[in-house]
Image (cartoon, helix red, strand yellow):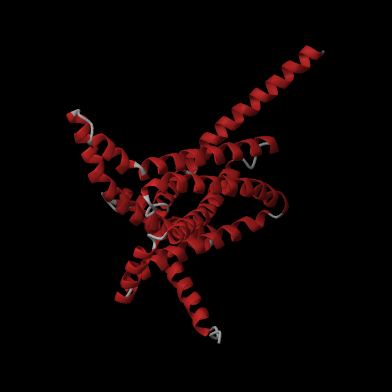
Amino acid sequence: MAGASLLTLLDDIASILDDVSLMSKVAAKKTAGVLGDDLALNAEQVTGVKADRELPVVWAVAKGSLLNKLILVPAALAISAVAPWLITPLLMLGGLFLCFEGAEKVLHSVFHSKEDDKHKEEVKDFNEVTLDAAQYEADKIKGAIRTDFILSAEIIVITLGVVSESSFLTQVITLFAIAFIITGGVYGLVAIIVKMDDAGLYLSKKRAAIAQWFGRGLLAFAPFLMKCLSVIGTVAMFLVGGGILTHGVHVLSEFITDAAQETALIPNLGSIISAVLPTLLHGLIGIIAGVVVVAIVNLINWLKPEKG
């Protein structure tokens, strides 16, 4: 009897692990787009700190990301069991926040004044002081962890949707597996990206001509990549935020689906336009939502009585 019970237990464990493996693969495919945005946003968020502090900052954000997921996984499971209707409104609030951050960043870069530039230079000089550098680093970490929380929430909810029909144990294992794998993968790549210039400098000093050539290539490519990630990270805020808002509003989601189906009928370019259109509309909705929220926040701040 004991042997039969053990075999049954092992068979159950193997079955659960198979389910977890299958569900994890499906969830990874469905969250691939968010993962790309997550990578771009976080790589952009942790740039700008001193070279010798880049890896400690990435590690600090990675730990914050793990804590986010340790909070989000039980919370998602609890909400889905008690009040599943609450998940979409909470995600939409997070989407609005992403759109707000993206719009604020773009509007500031477009409308900033010369006084702002002067102030930035003063702050840059002042950051040579250890206290200010530490504060700047702490702000970077805080901002990156805050952004990660919203993106992690979307990843967890997408994964929860994939495993919703599975047993509770399979749901728990899959959610935690995805959470840890994603955190390790994303922040491992972030660490590689932010240290790319250091690797280039190291290789450029080697005796081998091929190493020097590759090192110089990395040194030339690293600043370009960082600029690209800055732009991609901002665009990702609108795409992810707009996508969350669109999926939360049934009318908008249906409109975009119908528009994609209609454009697919266009001769020659229909398939390409149909594939790109939803992404463009998500971004447009994200931009509009972000600008509206920025306007509301600025209006509230303007209406607030000044403290004497």
Residue at the far right in the pictured view: 1
Compare residues 75 and 191 and report the one nearer the observer.
Answer: 191
Q: Is residue 118 left or right of residue 70?
A: left
Q: Position of residue 88 (x, y in %)?
A: 59, 57
- Residue at figure coordinates x 20%, y 28% from the top left: 208
Q: Position of residue 285 (x, y in %)?
A: 43, 64
Q: Position of residue 66 (x, y in %)?
A: 57, 44
Compare residues 236 and 137 and report the one nearer the observer.
Answer: 137
In which quarter of the view is residue 159 placed? top right
On screen, residue 79 above or below 167: below
- How many labels were placed on the picture? 0
Compare residues 232 and 269 and report the one nearer the observer.
Answer: 232
Image quarter (top left, top right, bottom left or bottom right) of the N terminus: top right
- Residue at figure coordinates x 19%, y 35% from the top left: 213
- Residue at figure coordinates x 38%, y 51% from the top left: 50
Q: Is residue 262 visible?
A: no
- Residue at figure coordinates x 42%, y 63% from the top left: 102
Q: Is residue 196 left or right of residue 295?
A: left
Q: Position of residue 115 (x, y in %)?
A: 32, 76
Image quarter (top left, top right, bottom left or bottom right) of the C terminus: bottom right
Residue at the far front in the pictured view: 129
Compare residues 38 and 55 and report the one nearer the observer.
Answer: 55
Q: Is residue 200 visible?
A: yes
On screen, residue 62 above or below 107: above
